[in-house]
Image (spheres, rainbow, N blue to C red):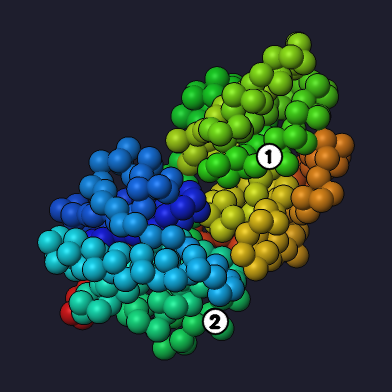
């Protein structure tokens, strides 16, 4: 089986594509892959680490109003479609899957025009412009949330969940604790602002860091994001002696292992994160990013809040004090934590990657 993967910009688009690749490899050990992304996106850094061949096209996103930049973007799109067709003809894939981000536009569109079976995967409740555009041309649409079904043609759309849910099921809690240097007797709170970090979360953590020592049975793992790490590290050093029950990291590449050991997650409400925590049943405190299209992260988060799987703090209400209060309430109440865990598990779709690969295999065979 020969598979082209495309998706980019943020980890929320890239990691699901890589999760699909790993599941394809489990089902089809002789499979071959090509990842087409943007050389300016995070995928240009992450994909080469996996040894999947990577090629790039030049593309940018459309603005939501008529501007000169959109004329330039249209020209880039047409050129990227042409470049994508050349790559696709050379690689000769059986199927192409796009997992989000504007780079998917020209790649998946080119594949559809060449008659190659195609699938897009929508991670969020409310789909973005690229997937809405592509849904008319692709063979299959996979969605993570049942609420998304109404946005796409019913005859070709299937609810699969997010493939990252399957990926974290292979995580090893013992390996995660060993990596962090935290023994089995301590709870782990993972504070994670997404693949690029989140300034508001970082500011709240710095504001409360001196009070974390009161949680003597808990270790805090604070992932700042690469771009924020040096600044945060310097701020913490200036504060002097901080509690020893916190580990500060710029990035975590073995997230499934760390999540498997996590007691409570504090983070954004990207679709991949929610797929991961619900697959594992991790209670969470979610701080949706207000800077995303259609405010989709808050819509994602409210679904977990509704069933009692998460507590939501909107960014304008996020402070060190409000975050500490929310953490204290969960960590001090074992009964509430257990109920949140059960509620989280009730939303999980741990076989999502398997379902997606089954769908990919089916449309490839039809050709």
Examine the rendered structure and indicate whether residue 33 appears above or below residue 98: above
Residue 294: give x, y in percent of width and height.
Answer: 65, 68
Against 154, residue 208 (above or below) is: above
For label 2, the residue is 151
Residue in the image at 22% along x and 54% along y: 33
Q: Residue furthest top?
A: 241
Label placed on residue 199: 1
Residue at image point 45% right, 35% down: 253
Query: Mark 2 vs mark 1: which is more N-terminal?
Result: 2
Q: Nearer the viewer, mark 2 or mark 1?
A: 1
Q: Position of residue 342 (x, y in %)?
A: 67, 55
SS of the residue at dot 1?
helix
What is the quadrant of residue 37 in the picture? bottom left
Reply above or below: 11 against 246. Answer: below
Is residue 77 or residue 27 the one in the foreground?
Answer: 77
**In the structure shown, which secondary structural element does the residue marked by tag 2 occupy?**
helix
- In which quarter of the view is residue 102 placed? bottom left
Q: Is residue 194 above or below residue 38?
A: above
């Amino acid at each position: 089986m020969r598979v082209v993967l495309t998706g980019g910009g943020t980890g929320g688009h890239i990691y699901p594509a890589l999760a699909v690749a790993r599941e394809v490899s489990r089902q089809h050990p002789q499979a071959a892959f090509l990842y087409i992304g943007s050389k300016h996106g995070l995928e240009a850094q992450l994909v080469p680490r996996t040894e999947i061949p990577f090629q790039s096209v030049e593309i940018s996103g459309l603005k939501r109003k008529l501007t000169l930049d959109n004329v330039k973007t249209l020209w880039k799109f047409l050129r990227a479609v042409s470049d994508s067709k050349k790559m696709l003809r050379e690689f000769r894939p059986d199927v192409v899957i796009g997992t989000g981000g504007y780079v998917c536009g020209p790649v998946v569109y080119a594949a559809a025009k060449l008659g190659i079976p195609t699938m897009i995967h929508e991670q969020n409740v409310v789909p973005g412009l690229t997937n809405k555009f592509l849904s008319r041309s692709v063979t299959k649409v996979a969605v993570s949330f049942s609420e998304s079904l109404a946005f796409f043609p019913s005859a070709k759309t299937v609810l699969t969940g997010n493939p990252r849910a399957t990926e974290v099921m292979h995580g090893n809690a013992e390996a995660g604790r060993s990596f962090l240097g935290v023994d089995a007797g301590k709870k782990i709170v993972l504070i994670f602002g997404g693949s690029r970090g989140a300034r508001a979360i970082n500011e709240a953590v710095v504001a409360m860091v001196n009070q974390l020592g009161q949680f003597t049975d808990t270790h805090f793992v604070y992932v700042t994001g690469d771009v924020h790490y040096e600044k945060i590290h310097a701020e913490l050093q200036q504060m002097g002696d901080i509690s020893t029950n916190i580990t500060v990291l710029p990035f975590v590449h073995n997230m499934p292992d760390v999540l498997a050991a996590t007691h409570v997650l504090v983070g954004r409400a990207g679709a991949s994160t929610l797929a991961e925590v619900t697959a594992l049943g991790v209670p969470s405190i979610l701080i949706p990013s207000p800077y995303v299209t259609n405010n989709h992260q808050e819509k994602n988060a409210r679904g977990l809040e509704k069933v009692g799987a998460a507590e939501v703090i909107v960014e304008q209400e996020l402070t060190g004090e409000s975050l500490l209060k929310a953490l204290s309430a969960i960590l001090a109440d074992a009964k509430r934590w257990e109920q949140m865990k059960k509620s989280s598990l009730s939303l999980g779709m741990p076989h999502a990657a398997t379902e997606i690969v089954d769908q990919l295999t089916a449309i490839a065979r039809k050709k």
